[in-house]
Image (spheres, rainbow, N blue to C red):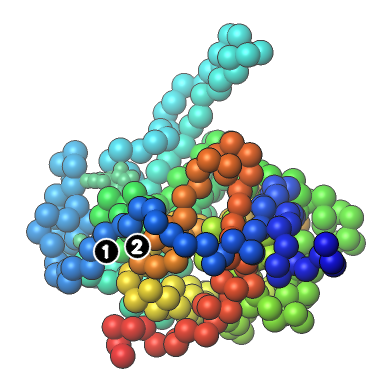
Amino acid sequence: MGKFDIKQHPHRRYNPLTGDWVLVSPHRSQRPWQGQVEKITEQKRPKYEPDCYLCPGNKRAGGSKNPKYKNTFVFTNDFSALIKDTPDGLNKDADLFKAKSEKGICRVICFSPNHNLTIPEMEIEEIKMVIDLWIDENETLGAQPFINYVQIFENKGSVMGCSNPHPHGQIWAQESIPDLPLKEDNLQKKYYVEHNGNTLLSDYLKKELALKERIILETIHFVVLVPFWTTWPFETMIISKRPIPGISELSEEERYDFARAYKGLTILYDNLFEISFPYSAGIHQCPTDGDIHRHWHLHMHFYPPLLRSATVKKFMVGYEMLANAQRDITPEQAAEKLRALPDIHYKKK
Ligand code: H2U
Ligand code: ZN
């Protein structure tokens, strides 16, 4: 049987942020593929699209008209999943039919007036304005007494169910702390208490920076890496070097630097298969419930669905749906692939 080799033998890896495990099967990554092939639809898009509900000056569903915005633009989602004026209430049978009313606010953020841009093609200065707006929104929404968590995210590409290629993201702010940030909250708090006030991610970063196996790129204030415990093939994280609990604590200089990390990573993603790389990405940060959260360490997750090419995506089905997340290509192999790509966008070659 020989000795266990993490590079070759099936094993489980633990996610210290969520407490979940992932099954890694490195020996399977050479397996032939005869499954579904996604179509690539890379059409050249115009700068302005008369039918786009996010372009400047256009009408949205529900009748509102977008202003002729020049940089970024934010509005309340016309089809918000969460509503501010939801009445308080509980389900009577709180045992097996537990239910509770939930208040919230949903916002949509246009990253640019330019319909055909994406983050990797935007200028640092422009991406920094998106980050500034995230921070403004985080502060205004978080200051509402009924908002205890602000989830900022970006859904990119039709494979991810994104409804419009216009560069945009969303914010859902709500009364409860949703499941995933709550898991991270609990485990980061436990770690912080047990490790003399070190955040889990600062200790993790220290080790990753020494090993260099999973680092993709590093800026002055941020590290981009493929975490040891990732589930999606090319999943990554941007982690701030300084252990700050949320984006509101980012200095001017750190905001520019965050923009550099965000752009740098998404250029590598686009260069991987030479397509506009789809993903869901989002910020994880401390709740806005008024408590102090020094155990929280700001980071951004990127979950891209693609596996082997622009047309072959990873399906989280079967065993993953019923038992556990699983992956074939190892996080180290994924990091090596991403790290080796040119840092100039393929369209600019
Ligand atoms: P995606 O990021 O998944 O494409 O969603 C875009 C959001 O834009 C979606 O939540 C909202 C949808 O409700 N929307 C409006 O608020 N107004 C519109 O006119 C169309 C879409
Ligand atoms: Zn548009």
Circle 1 SS class? loop
Image location (x, y in percent) of residue 318:
53, 40
Residue 109 is at least partly visible in this image: no
Which residue matches tag 2?
311
Circle 2 SS class? loop
Q: Amino acid at mark 1?
A: Ile
Comes first in the chain, label 1 or label 2: 1
Q: Residues within 10 Å of mark 1 (few under 14, many from 20)?
A: few
Nearest to the observer: residue 18 or residue 260: 18
260 in relation to 96, above or below: below
Find out if the beta carbon at label 1 lies less than 8 Å from the nearest ligand 1 atom: no
Image location (x, y in percent) of residue 96:
63, 14
330 in relation to 52, above or below: below
Spatial CA distance of label 1 from label 2 is 7 Å
Identify the image quadrant of residue 219: bottom right
At x 63%, y 39%, the residue is 323
Image location (x, y in percent) of residue 78:
28, 41
Which residue matches tag 1?
40
Q: Which residue extends farthest top?
A: 92
At x 17%, y 71%, the residue is 44
At x 44%, y 26%, the residue is 86
Quadrant (top left/top right/bottom left/bottom right) for the N terminus: bottom right
Q: Residues within 10 Å of mark 2 (few under 14, many from 20)?
A: few
For residue 59, side relative to residue 346 (left or right): left
Q: Which residue extends farthest bottom?
A: 349
Q: Amino acid at mark 2?
A: Thr
Identify the image quadrant of residue 324: top right
At x 59%, y 36%, the residue is 322
Q: Are marks 1 and 2 in contact (CB under 8 Å)?
A: yes
